[in-house]
C-alpha cells in the first residue's frame, strides 16, 4: 500500500476532471451496473500513468461524445476495488495503468499497459476518442 499523501496528487489528476474514485468491490459493481457507458481507469504510481494514461484520459473526455460515467481505482491502494475491476476486464490480464470502456456493463474497449507505455498522451486520447465515437 502506498501512503495517502503520495497518491493524493495522482488521484486528483483524475478527480479534478470529473472521475469518481471507487474504493470497494461493491462500488465497482454498482458503477458497472449503470446503463450507458463507463470509463474505468486503473491508476498507478508509475511514470506511464503520469505521462500518458492520466493526461490521455483527461484529454479524451473533452470530445463531444464521451462516457456517461467516469470512474477510477488505484492499484496498490484500492486493492478490493482494483481486483473487482480486473474481474470485469477478463480476458485481459491484470495491468496498471489500464483504461477500459464498458457499455451497459459489457467491456467494449481496452487499453492495457503495453498500449499506454511509451505512447504520448495525445495518442492515448485519440484511441479513446475513437472508442467513444463508436460506443457512446
Image (tube, grey):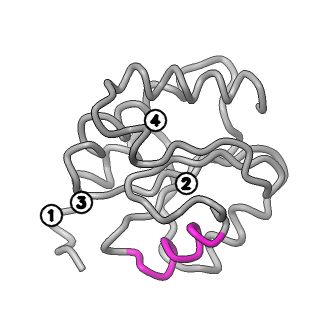
Q: Which residue is mark 2?
A: 71
Q: What distance separates the C-alpha of mark 4 from that of mark 3?
A: 18 Å
Query: As displayed, is residue 48 above or below residue 28?
Result: above
Q: What distance separates the C-alpha of mark 2 from that of mark 3?
A: 16 Å
Q: Residue at x 15, y 67 (%)?
A: 5
Query: As displayed, is residue 118 above or below residue 130?
Result: below
Task: Using the rendered view, name the quadrant where residue 56 is placed.
Answer: top left
Q: What distance separates the C-alpha of mark 4 from that of mark 1?
A: 21 Å
Q: Earlier in the sequence, mark 4 or mark 3?
A: 3
Query: As displayed, is residue 10 above or below residue 33?
Result: above
* Circle nearer the viewer, 4 or 3: 4
* Circle nearer the viewer, 2 or 4: 4
Q: Are marks 4 and 3 in contact (CB under 8 Å)?
A: no
Q: Residue at x 38, y 57 (%)?
A: 96
Dominant secondary structure of the magenta stretch?
helix
* Circle nearer the viewer, 4 or 1: 4
Horizontal relation, residue 98 to residue 89: left or right: left
Q: Secondary structure at mark 2?
A: strand
The range drawn in magenta is 78-87
Q: Are marks 2 and 4 in contact (CB under 8 Å)?
A: no
Crowding near the residue tagged with mark 3, few <14, some 14–19, many ≥20 C-alpha atoms within 10 Å: few
Q: Which residue is mark 4?
A: 57
Q: Which residue is mark 1?
A: 6
Q: Are marks 1 and 3 in contact (CB under 8 Å)?
A: yes
Task: Using the rendered view, name the quadrant where residue 109 is placed.
Answer: top right
Q: Nearer the viewer, residue 18 or 61?
A: 61
Crowding near the residue tagged with mark 1, few <14, some 14–19, many ≥20 C-alpha atoms within 10 Å: few
Q: Earlier in the sequence, mark 2 or mark 4?
A: 4
Q: Secondary structure at mark 4?
A: helix
Q: Nearer the viewer, residue 71 or 101?
A: 101
Amino acid at each position: 500500500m502506498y501512503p495517502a499523501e503520495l497518491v493524493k496528487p495522482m488521484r486528483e489528476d483524475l478527480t479534478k476532471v470529473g472521475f469518481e474514485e471507487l474504493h470497494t468491490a461493491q462500488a465497482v459493481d454498482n458503477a458497472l451496473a449503470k446503463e450507458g457507458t463507463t470509463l474505468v481507469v486503473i491508476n498507478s504510481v508509475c511514470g506511464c500513468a503520469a505521462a500518458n494514461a492520466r493526461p490521455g484520459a483527461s484529454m479524451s473526455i473533452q470530445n463531444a461524445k464521451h462516457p456517461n460515467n467516469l470512474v477510477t481505482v488505484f492499484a496498490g491502494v484500492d486493492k478490493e476495488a482494483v481486483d473487482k475491476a480486473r474481474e470485469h476486464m477478463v480476458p485481459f490480464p491484470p495491468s496498471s495503468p489500464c483504461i477500459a470502456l464498458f457499455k451497459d456493463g459489457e467491456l467494449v474497449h481496452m487499453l492495457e499497459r503495453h498500449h499506454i507505455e511509451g505512447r504520448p498522451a495525445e495518442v492515448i486520447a485519440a484511441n479513446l476518442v475513437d472508442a467513444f465515437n463508436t460506443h457512446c
